[in-house]
Image (cartoon, coloured by chain):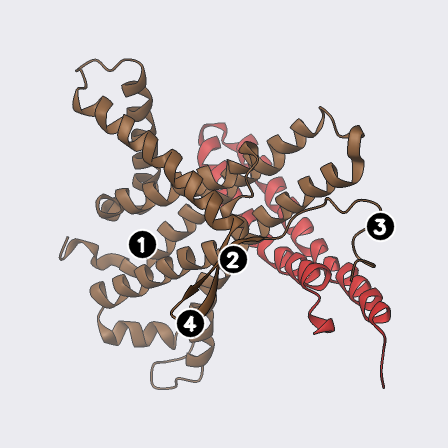
Chain colours: A brown, B red
Amino acid sequence: MEHGIWLSASSDIDVMVHGILKYSFFGHEVWITTTQVSLLIVVLILAGFSIAAGRAIRKGTEVPGGFQNVVELIVEKLDGMVDSTMGKNAKKYYNYIGTVFIFLLVSNISGLLGLRPPTADYGVTFPLGVMTFLLIHYNELRYQKPKDIWKDKCSPLPPWLPIWLPINIISDVAVPISLSLRLFANILSGTIMMALVYGLLGWIATIWPAALHVYFDLFSGAIQTYVFCMLTMTYISNAIGDGGDVKA
Amino acid sequence: MEFNENFILGCSAIGAGLALIAGIGPGVGQGIAAGHAAAAVGRNPGAKSDITSTMLLGQAVAETTGLYGLLVAILLLFVKPLLW
């Protein structure tokens, strides 16, 4: 089925996930795909950076210099971002939000390294959305009274008339889906655009696509990372509500 | 009635093009958000970083509907669900 969509001449437009290695897992056919390979590379990069950072901090000096300075700057900026959004609940979420931020940032801009960005696979972004979903409802159950949750779920109408309940539940379920689809679609569209530019233009696409890389990989990736983390933090602090101080 | 593959692919391509009409809404919405943010910065230049981050967040949320249209188009073009 080579006709049709692939604008005839070039067959080297390559945006899909490819299987690399097939193995059998309890009788199921499972594939190692390009996503997993680039995920592994990203994780190795991050692990190397973390080991180096840990070593730099462990023998750190009072007045930071060089690499220690960079590491402290990153941690400080991330903590400041969490602080400014979550306020008094920030302390418990420094680690999670920081980890998600660094991981998403490196995977989004890994297109610059010639990888297919891992976040351009729905199987990578959906678990992140599900993690946000679980955090939201864990915090909701922990910090709010069941009566208040019920009242919130019937919200525009009074609590004894739960006509609005299904709609509110649907909008709760839509949160992780829209979070993960937003990230996925942004990165995927960037990947497809770059593949089209390189695949269709051939030798014309020599130096100037660097500008497109700056937009589609760096700018778009960084914005989406920021948005994902901001929305996660906003949802979580909404779920905690005013009760955050009680057990913190 | 039987349709051949090419007809279905052509219709999928038309559908993908129509799905991207969804891009109009987010374009208008993001433009309005950016315009109001510019006005806000003009009124209160000190709050520029707060305004910018709020604007980006709102724009990213407004963008979602357009991205759904894009996803439908991508599915129609690359996954070809109508041929299954």
Dot 3 crowding, Cα within 10 Å, few <14, some 14–19, many 20+: few
Residue A60 x/y as whole percent: 19, 19
Q: Are marks 3 and 1 in contact (CB under 8 Å)?
A: no
Disc number for residue A27: 4
Q: Chain of mark 2?
A: A
Dot 2 crowding, Cα within 10 Å, few <14, some 14–19, many 20+: some
- N-terminal of the pair, mark 3 or mark 2, is 3
Q: Which residue is mark 2?
A: A122
Quadrant of residue B2 within the rendered picture: bottom right
Between the residue at mark 4 and the residue at mark 2, the CA separation in whole angstroms equals 24 Å
Q: Are marks 4 and 1 in contact (CB under 8 Å)?
A: no
Label 4 secondary element = loop
- The answer to whether marks 1 and 2 sit on the same chain is yes
Residue found at x 26% / y 61%: A139
Dot 1 crowding, Cα within 10 Å, few <14, some 14–19, many 20+: many
Q: Chain of mark 4?
A: A
Residue A176 x/y as whole percent: 44, 62
- The answer to whether marks 3 and 1 sit on the same chain is yes
